[in-house]
Image: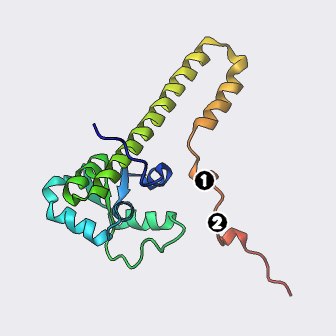
């Protein structure tokens, strides 16, 4: 086996590019193109030339509603540029397949790092589920006096609720009367 090269890309950058869309962990074509150091349109062209390698569970194009929702969640629009079409989303298998169609040494090296990021994410999610099971077992073992502690731990483990996030920007409820 060859020596493992030092990282081309910080793991955090890859992990921040992994999104949950349609219940799947995916990466968008523009993020992948940036990591591979190619233009997004070149990446998409390579995929279209090899469409048989990318079934729906490997890659899919976002619909207009998903694209609009995604744009509204991302604070800056500069990464979207003058895009005319919704982006493609690639699952872990689709990302692995990209190295076979892009064929550059950088694509292979970046793909290895992306695969490692997906594995780390899976491990984190699995340990979270394992922790929840252990917490359930402890709760059954101890009496009600610890219920407050268990409830507090569950709240810390829960993903942030959309409604509890502070909204940014001007909202109708923030209106104030003009000064005379």
**Foreground of the two, 101 or 137:** 101
Q: Nearer the viewer, mark 1 or mark 2?
A: 2
Number of marks drawn: 2
From the top left corner, tell me how far across and down residue 9 is, in percent. Answer: 44, 54
- Disc 1 packing (10 Å; few <14; some 14–19; many ≥20): few
SS class of the residue under badge 2? Answer: loop
Give the vertical position of 30 relative to 6 (above or below). below
Q: Earlier in the sequence, mark 1 or mark 2?
A: 1
Q: From this viewpoint, which residue is outermost toward the front?
A: 3
| Residue ID for mark 1 | 163
Marks 1 & 2, CB-CB < 8 Å contact: no
**Foreground of the two, 96 or 165:** 96
From the top left corner, tell me how far across and down residue 118 is, in percent. Answer: 39, 43
Q: From this viewpoint, which residue is outermost toward the right?
A: 180
Residue 23 appears in the rendering: no
| Residue 168, disc | 2
- Disc 2 packing (10 Å; few <14; some 14–19; many ≥20): few
């Amino acid at each position: 086996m060859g020596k493992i090269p030092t990282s081309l890309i910080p793991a955090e950058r890859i992990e921040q590019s992994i999104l949950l869309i349609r219940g799947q962990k995916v990466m968008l074509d523009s993020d992948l193109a940036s990591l591979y150091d190619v233009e997004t349109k070149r990446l998409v062209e390579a995929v279209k030339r090899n469409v048989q390698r990318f079934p729906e569970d490997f890659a899919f194009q976002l619909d207009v509603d998903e694209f609009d929702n995604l744009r509204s969640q991302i604070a800056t629009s500069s990464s979207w540029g003058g895009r005319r079409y919704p982006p493609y989303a690639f699952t872990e298998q689709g990302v692995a397949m990209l190295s076979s169609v892009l064929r550059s040494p950088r694509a292979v090296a970046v793909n290895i790092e992306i695969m490692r990021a997906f594995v780390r994410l899976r491990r984190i999610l699995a340990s979270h589920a394992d922790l929840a099971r252990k917490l359930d077992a402890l709760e059954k073992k101890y009496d009600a006096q610890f219920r407050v502690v268990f409830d507090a731990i569950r709240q810390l483990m829960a993903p942030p609720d959309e409604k509890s996030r502070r909204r940014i920007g001007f909202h109708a409820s923030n209106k104030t009367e003009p000064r005379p």
